[in-house]
Image: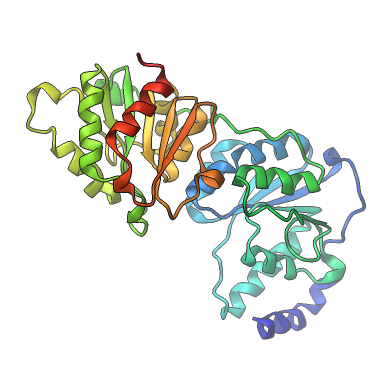
Amino acid sequence: MGALMGAAERTLEADAGAGVRPNGERRLDEYGSILVIKLGALGDFFQAMGAFKRLRAVHPKARITLMTTKPYEGLARKSGYFDDVYVDVRPRWYSLRGWLALRRYLMAARFDRVYDLQNNDRTALYFRLFPRPCRPEWVGVAKGASHQDKTPDRRTVHIFDSLRRTLAVGGVDGIEPDDLRWMDGDVSALESEHGLRAPYVLLIPGSSPTRLMKRWPADHFIALTKRLVADGLQVVILGTNAESDATGAIAAAFAGEEENVSNVLDLTGRTDLHQLTALGRAAFAVIGNDTGPTHMLGPTGAPCIALYPGVSDPARFHPLGSNVHTIQKDHMADITVDEVYALFKKATQVS
């Protein structure tokens, strides 16, 4: 990588004179061009929404660009917090052409300030793509940044608090979770065509196929569903088609029971992200694994119970929201149905 960077430095030497020059300290509302970096994943992206919202507020005159990856481009544009979105193709370490293209983009954009909300080794390398005389102000953990976050315990606090600390170094405060009101999906068809009805509880039994250890067992979800239905609640199962093995096992357990046809609704693959948040705002409760949709639904205000295995850290990665609760055991199967149901009753104040 060092050789590649050296080659890039020599190849673009002529570009350096036209690059971005660092600005002196100025009022935040005086900046003209801002880059915000947040590449993913889904849960982390939603954890950063409050920071996006606040950056838009403190830089009202600036043209703000988000650098992210393709899955989050549409969300970023819909949010209204950005004037433009640059999709990072994340060039391989050996792709000299890819790195040079990225560097040319960064140099040509003439950003006054960069907020690195990803704060990892890759984005620290992006900082190095700027020749020293041409670096914009950089807020993040990258060594040599003009506003370097040197917080010693940043890897032990909640990711949202970590973002707050990074931005505070750049003079940005007042960051609060975003309630995602801008995600206003229409759920009327789910009511008229699929029988969605209140009061309902949202179940999120899936996870990334590469993180199966994060899934609470299907038989546990089935037993919990029976209790929720007995309480007079509709149970709505959410997930993508890639998670149909997890969601389908639950739905199948009730498919042959006529009395549960309207009480257990499987919406696997039938909702988009904007509909999920609309569902969350009207939900009686949300119960799910440590996965992106659970992190989306916490800020909507519904009572949210998130289930964690020992490999996860709820202290650092629990969903944001005013009524969020977590349970963690070394193995997901060790989390009992009784524990989840008792916490559900407490969170929803069901007597």
* Foreground of the two, 165 or 75: 165
Could you say which quadrant of the image residue 337 lies in?
top left
Considering every residue shown, the one lying at the far top of the view is: 351
Tally the marks. Answer: 0
Question: Which scheme is used to colour this image of the protein?
Answer: rainbow
Residue 200's x, y, as percent?
31, 22
Q: Tell me which residue sits at (83%, 45%) in the image.
A: 31
Q: Going by the image, does 245 lie left or right of 4?
A: left
Q: Position of residue 302 (x, y in %)?
A: 45, 25
- Residue 192 locus on image (x, y percent): 26, 20
Residue at horizontal 81 percent and vertical 65 percent from the top: 144
Q: Is residue 33 left or right of residue 287?
A: right
Vertical placement of 191 versus 236: above or below? Answer: above
Say which of 283 and 3 sits in front.
283
Is any part of residue 230 visible from this angle? yes
Q: Residue at x 49, y 25 (%)?
A: 301
Q: Position of residue 275 (x, y in %)?
A: 40, 31
Name above or below for residue 179 compared with residue 116. above
Q: Quadrant of the N terminus?
A: bottom right
Q: Is residue 39 left or right of residue 341?
A: right
Horizontal side, residue 315 vs residue 294: left or right: right
Q: Is residue 60 visible?
A: no
Rendering quarter of residue 52: top right
Nearer to me, 266 or 194: 266
Quadrant of the drawing holding the C terminus? top left
